[in-house]
Amino acid sequence: MSIHDDTPDWLRPARTAFNRLQPGADQEAAQLARLTEQQRVLRVHRSVAESAEAHEPRWLRRLAWGGGALGATAAVLLSAMLLLDPPGTRTARAEPATGTGFIPLVPEGEFRAALAASRSVAVWLQPAELPRERLALLGLPFDAARADETVRAELMLNPSGQLLAVRILEVAP
């Protein structure tokens, strides 16, 4: 670690201090030994992982890919079914509940439970005026030329405010 003659005088103290900070040969040898050991451990881990993959049965991998393909196919079919026939169309076209004149807007079981519970808990009837175009959504005939007119109806609500059914009071003009 000699100081070269071409080093300017103002830079010599810094060069001397820098040379003192450089690690010695024993520190470099210890660092090299640590790095060599780390590389050996990584090689061992890699070889263990590769041997585990080699011993894994092929049918297991095929089963995993097949399960993923089956799930993707089911998702596509479900999406197609929902696009072709959205939920709620069957309940909206349902016949009026016997004797009440109401068209259920919730699943039939929930509607019947609300009617049965109406003896102990009050069901609210709310008068309303609906646009005539809503008749089509309920599966009832409607004239598109009069879509901007309104129809008198009654809405059945449970105490929490959920709309259970609708009864059309006036359809003709």
Image (spheres, rainbow, N blue to C red):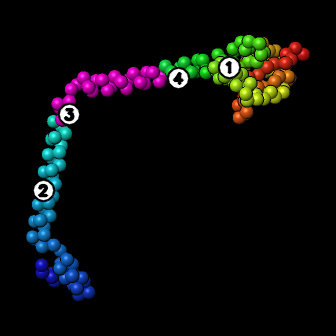
In reply to whether residue 80 is colored magenta, the answer given is no
Give the residue number, with chain letter if any, for mark 1.
112
Which amino acid, mark 4?
Answer: Ser
Q: Closer to the camera, 21 or 57?
A: 57
Q: Give the mark, 2 or 3, whose residue is nearer the N terminus.
A: 2
* Label 1: how many Cα within 10 Å (few below 14, some 14–19, many 20+): some
Disc with the residue nearer the chain's start (2 vs 4): 2
- Looking at the image, the residue that sits furthest to the front is 120
Residue contact at pointers 1 and 2, CB within 8 angstroms:
no
* Residue position for label 3: 53
Q: Position of residue 135 (x, y in %)?
A: 77, 18
Q: Residues within 10 Å of mark 2 (few under 14, many from 20)?
A: few
Query: Which residues, given as a range, are shown in magenta?
Result: 52-76
Mark 1 and mark 2 lie on one chain; the one further toward the N terminus is 2
Residue receiving disc 2: 36
C-alpha distance separating marks 3 and 1? 58 Å
> What residue is shown at x 43% (from left), y 24% (from top)?
72
Q: CA distance from mark 1 to mark 2?
A: 77 Å
Q: Nearer the viewer, mark 4 or mark 1?
A: 1
- Answer with mark 3 or mark 1, whichever residue precedes in sequence: 3
Task: Identify residue for label 4.
Answer: 79
Q: Quadrant of residue 127?
A: top right
Three-letter code for the amino acid on which mark 1 is drawn: Arg
Residue 99 position within the rendered picture, expressed as x and y whole percent measured from the top left: 77, 12
